[in-house]
Amino acid sequence: MTTVVEESISNRRNICKAAVIIASLDIDLAAQVCTRLNESLVRAIADEVAHLDSISTTKYRQILEEFSASALHSERLGGLKMAQ
């Protein structure tokens, strides 16, 4: 069973964006995020992080704004699964 996060970053373009976001996080926070993803997705993102070149501030901001907007509009669910 895939999570909403996994479904939303399953295509190549979004994996690139996820790599930018993960690379910008503190290493401990990035590790916490990755524990919530399936192994194949973590591998894809890690591979993309390894191949990241520098990006412009404008592109970086655009990716963060897209992520923020998407997070604000996503449905929040509770329950035991989310609590774990």
Image: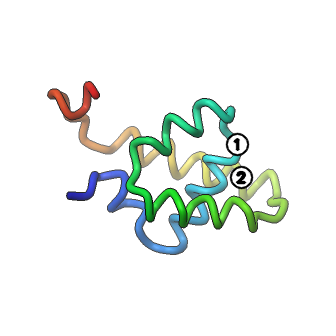
Question: Residue 73 lies in what quarter of the image?
Answer: top left
Quadrant housing the C terminus: top left
- Residue at image point 82% right, 58% down: 56
Q: Is residue 10 left or right of residue 31?
A: left
- Is residue 34 shown above or below 50? above
Hey, which residue is sitting farthest left in the picture?
79
- Residue at image point 69% right, 59% down: 49
Q: For the residue carrying disc 2, how many other residues have a C-alpha within 10 Å: few (<14), some (14-19), or many (20+)? A: some
Q: What secondary structure is found at the residue carrying circle 2?
A: helix
Q: Is residue 68 left or right of residue 58?
A: left
- Residue at image point 82% right, 65% down: 53
Residue 9 x, y percent position in the rendering: 43, 62
Q: Are marks 1 and 2 in contact (CB under 8 Å)?
A: yes
Looking at the picture, which amino acid does disc 1 mark? Answer: Ser
Hey, which residue is sitting farthest bottom in the picture?
12
Residue 59 x, y percent position in the rendering: 72, 58
- Is residue 32 shown above or below 47? above
Q: What secondary structure is found at the residue carrying circle 1?
A: helix
Q: Is residue 57 left or right of residue 71?
A: right
Question: Residue 47 lies in what quarter of the image?
Answer: bottom right
Quadrant housing the N terminus: bottom left
Q: For the residue carrying disc 1, how many other residues have a C-alpha within 10 Å: few (<14), some (14-19), or many (20+)? A: few
- Residue corresponding to mark 1: 24
- Residue corresponding to mark 2: 60
Give the Cα distance between marks 1 and 2: 10 Å
- Of the numbered discs in the image, which one, if any, rests on residue 9? none
Looking at the picture, which amino acid does disc 2 mark? Answer: Tyr
Residue 22 x, y percent position in the rendering: 61, 47
- Residue at image point 19% right, 29% down: 78
Q: Is residue 78 left or right of residue 36?
A: left
Question: Residue 18 lies in what quarter of the image?
Answer: bottom right
Residue 77 x, y percent position in the rendering: 20, 34
